[in-house]
Amino acid sequence: MWAAAAVGSGIFVLLGYFIDYEIILTLRLILMRWSVLLAAVALFLGLFNLLTVHWSKVSEQEKGWPFSALLILVFLVTLIMGLVFGPDNQISLLLFNYIQLPIEASLMALLAVFLAVAGFRLVSRRRDPFSLIFVVVALFVLLGTGPSLGASDSDAYILLRQLRNWIAQVWASGGARGILLGVALGAGLTGLRVLLAVDRPYGD
Amino acid sequence: MLGSIDIVGLLVLLLFLGLLLGFAAVGRNWPTVFRPVPGFEELGTAIERAVEAGERVHLSLGTGSVIGSDSAPALAGLAMLSRVASVTTMSDKPVVVTAGDGAMTMLAQETLRSAYQQAKVGERYRRTSGRMLGPTPLSYVASLPILIANEDVSVHILAGSFGAEGALAADFGERQHAFVIAGTDDAQSQALLYATAEYPMIGEEIFAGGAYLNVGPLHRASLRAQDAVRMLIVVLILTGTVLRALGVIL
């Protein structure tokens, strides 16, 4: 029954993209509105799942349970703050601006360090021509994109910028388009498999 | 009221459908020959090793949502999950799946439940094996190191939609010396995964996971259909380029 409902809904939504017929378009709009509503409900269920997982870790004293206890505490405090005082009150904004935002920004900043280390690790671990090309091209693009180390009108820097543009606009763009075409084909057929109920992530 | 019909779009859809069903029909008499993809070749051994050593397999479905255009790689990840879950059902530490979206978490739980029931060990299924780690990309990825360390993860599969945070997700696995195979749909994120993951899935390899892991004949058929349409596109691009160079088309 679930498969029939999923296939039926999928076919109507898909046909709505190709056939400009009032009944199909209306039905497609209704189904898409339902999907947005269900996704919002699923977010609540996801948060409940988060709480359940960490509650079971605390109750069974699993490895790292104090972190789970801290998560539950902060989760409930933030939730109660938001429900009682609203999401735009001073305390909620303080929690967001001075705790969540700096942590997320720090993680993004760490990414640059992680990538530099990963670049060195790549050459030592995967000793093949492609890894070497990958690292050399990354260095060229990095040097050609950043500010000049010497005079900005020097021949070497202009050549580096031109080389960077040539790599990015010709080779990288061409390769990326090929990848995107392949990804689009793969995504289309994955969707078709779900539509034909070959893949049933919603259960049997 | 009858409006216009996008004939070209419908024809492309029918071409996909015809090729998929056609290749599925001839699949038994015409076995699929796979191009070697080191990540998929090593994955089976890595999972077996993890099951024997009492270590955990972790599959990440990324930070994309079900209703967005970024759901396709996660759906491919769910197809891989159905196979991985059936292999690890009898392990002391069965596979754990994480996502950054509530609806995706529910799909992961249902996929796990189906895999356990098909393996006739439905009573071993735990709903907490499918988890939502965090609703934003960075809160999701910030939770990963603790999960990988505390749950003794030795196989770390990233198959879903990732942005730049995917590089961090892969690197956290590498730091725990786990077997890391990672793929996504975004070309820029694939470049980051190429640098950070031990076995990156490049291009559309993530969508071939089901066929490589032997999920079913229609997965192999869809891989063939994909290749057939790709060749058609290559021929069309080359023809267009030659005709343009000759001045036949402007």
Image (cartoon, coloured by chain):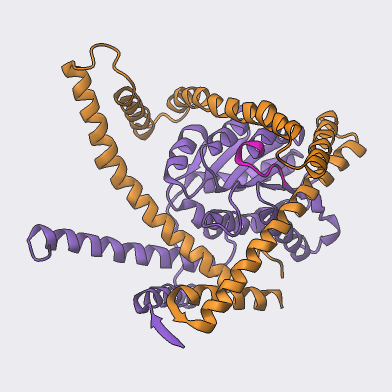
Viewport quadrant of the C terminus of chain A: bottom right
Q: Residue at x 57, y 33 (%)?
A: B168
Chain in orange on the image: A
Residue B28 in view (yes/no):
no
The tint of chain B in the picture is purple
Residue A23 on image: x %, y %: 54, 83
Q: Residue at x 55, y 42 (%)?
A: B181
Instruction: Look at the image and say whether residue B180 sits in the magenta stretch.
Output: no
Residue A27 on image: x %, y %: 58, 78
Residue A95 on image: x %, y %: 72, 30
Q: Tell which of B97 and B180 is nearer to you.
A: B97
Instruction: Look at the image and say whether residue B135 sits in the magenta stretch.
Output: yes
Viewport quadrant of the N terminus of chain A: bottom right
**Position above or below: B87 against B58:** below
Q: Residue at x 41, y 84 (%)?
A: B3
User: Residue B47's quadrant in the figure?
Assistant: top right
In the visual, does B223 lie left or right of A70?
Answer: left
Q: Tell which of B124 and A15 is nearer to you.
A: A15
Residue range highlighted in magenta: B132-139
Residue B142 on image: x %, y %: 66, 33
In the visual, does B105 lie left or right of B216?
Answer: right
The residue lying furthest to the bottom in this view is: B1
Q: Residue at x 37, y 28 (%)?
A: A135
Number of numbered discs on residues: 0
In the visual, does A122 lie left or right of B135?
Answer: left
User: Residue B150's quadrant in the figure?
Assistant: top right
The residue lying furthest to the right in this view is: A59
Residue B134 in view (yes/no):
yes
